[in-house]
Image (cartoon, helix red, strand yellow):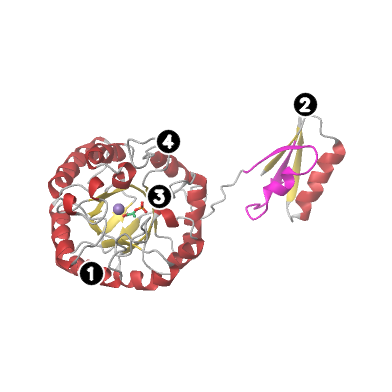
Amino acid sequence: MIVVMTPKATADQVQHVVNLVNEMGLKEHVIVGTDLTVVAVIGDDRKKDKGALEQAAGVDRVVPILAPYKLAAKETKPERSLVTIGKDVVFGGKHVPVIAGPCSVEGEDKILEAAAQVKAAGAHALRGGAFKPRTNPYSFQGYGEDGLKMLAAARDATGLPIVTEVLTPSDVQLVSKYADCLQIGTRNCQNFKLLEACGDQPKPVLIKRGMAMTLDEYLQATEYILAMGNPNVILCERGIRTFEDHTRNTLSLSAVPELQHRSHLPIVIDPSHGTGVARLVPAMARAAVAAGADGLAIEMHPSPEHAMTDGAQSLTPDVLKQTIESMRRVAAAVDREM
Ligand code: PEP
Ligand code: MN
C-alpha cells in the first residue's frame, strides 16, 4: 500500500507513519515530493489493517496496491484457469458451455424429461436445485437428498454433468457425493463457513455473486474457497439489486470483462435470475456471449407455466434450443465456440 500524507504533514508525522509501518513488520520507502510526501510500504501488507494507518495524524489516505484476493487475482496467475465439470465440460477456454435446466428438481420423471430436452437443445450440463433457498419458509424447499438421487439418474440417462446448489456446510459432503459441480447461491456468497467447506471437497464450485456485493467483495469470497485448496472455482454473475423494477435483478454484463481483467477464474452469466423475465433471456444470453462470458446458466422447464419455482423466467425447451443456436452465431463472431 501507499500512504499519502497531507500537504501540511510535518516531518514528525511522516516519521510516526514510518514507525507504525515498521511495527507491522514491513519496510518503508519515503518519497518526498514538491507538494506532498508519500510512504510506500514494502512487503505483503494484505493481512494488515490499512484503516489503522488512516487514523495517524498527517495522513490523507491509504491506497492499496495489491488486490486483497491473492489466489483469485490475475497478478498472481496471468493465464486463464480452465475448470472442468464432469468428464469434459471445460469453462474458461474457447468453448462456451451452457448449463441449463429447471430451477428445482420436481420429481424423477420431470427431471429426466427436462434433462433429455436440455441435451437435445445442445446444452452441456444440467442444473436443478434439490436444496432451494426460499425467501418464504412455507414455500417449496426442494426434495433434498431424494432430489440429488433424481439428478444422478438424469446424469446416468443423458451423460450430462450436474450442477446443484448446497445451502449449508453440513450438507457439503452429501451434495459433493452426487453433484459434478456445487453451486453456492447469491444469498450465501458471504457464508464464509460454507465457502470454506466447499473449498475442502474435490468437486468444482460455481459461486454466484451476492446480489449486493461489489466485485472486490465477490473475489474475496472466492478466495475462501481457493485458500482451502480447491482451485476449481467458476464465477457467476446473476444480477444485482438496484432501483430498476422492470427486471427482477439488474444483470451487470460489464462484470464479465472487469472480472476477467482482475481474475483468471472463468465467468458464467445467468440471464434467468439476471432478468427474471423469460422473454428477456435470449437477448441477454446473446449479449453475454458477445461480452466474452465463459459460459451460461439458463433456467428451462418442460412446461414453465407449471413450474414449482421460477416459472416466469424459465425458457421452454424450444426457446432454449433457438437461443443456443443464436448464441452459436454470436460466439463465432467473437472467436468462441458453443
Ligand atoms: C437458482 O439458481 O435457482 C438460484 C436460487 O439462484 P440465485 O442464488 O442466483 O438466486
Ligand atoms: Mn431459480
First in sequence, mark 1 or 2: give its number: 2
- How packed mark 2 is, by other alpha carbons closer than 10 Å (few <14, some 14-19, many 20 or more), is few
Residue shown at the point (41%, 69%) measured from the top left? 201
Q: Of the numbered discs in the image, which one, if any, rests on residue 80?
A: 3
The residue segment tinted magenta is 38-64
Judge whether 184 appears above or below 314 on screen.
below
What percent of the width, then of the height, locates residue 314?
22, 48
First in sequence, mark 3 or 2: give its number: 2
Mark 3 residue type: Arg
Judge whether 330 appears above or below 175 on screen.
above
**To which residue does mark 2 refer?**
34
First in sequence, mark 2 or 4: give its number: 2
Residue shown at the point (56%, 47%) measured from the top left? 67
Q: Secondary structure at mark 1?
A: helix
Label 2, label 4: how far apart the Cα atoms are: 45 Å
- Is residue 293 visible in this depiction of the protein? no
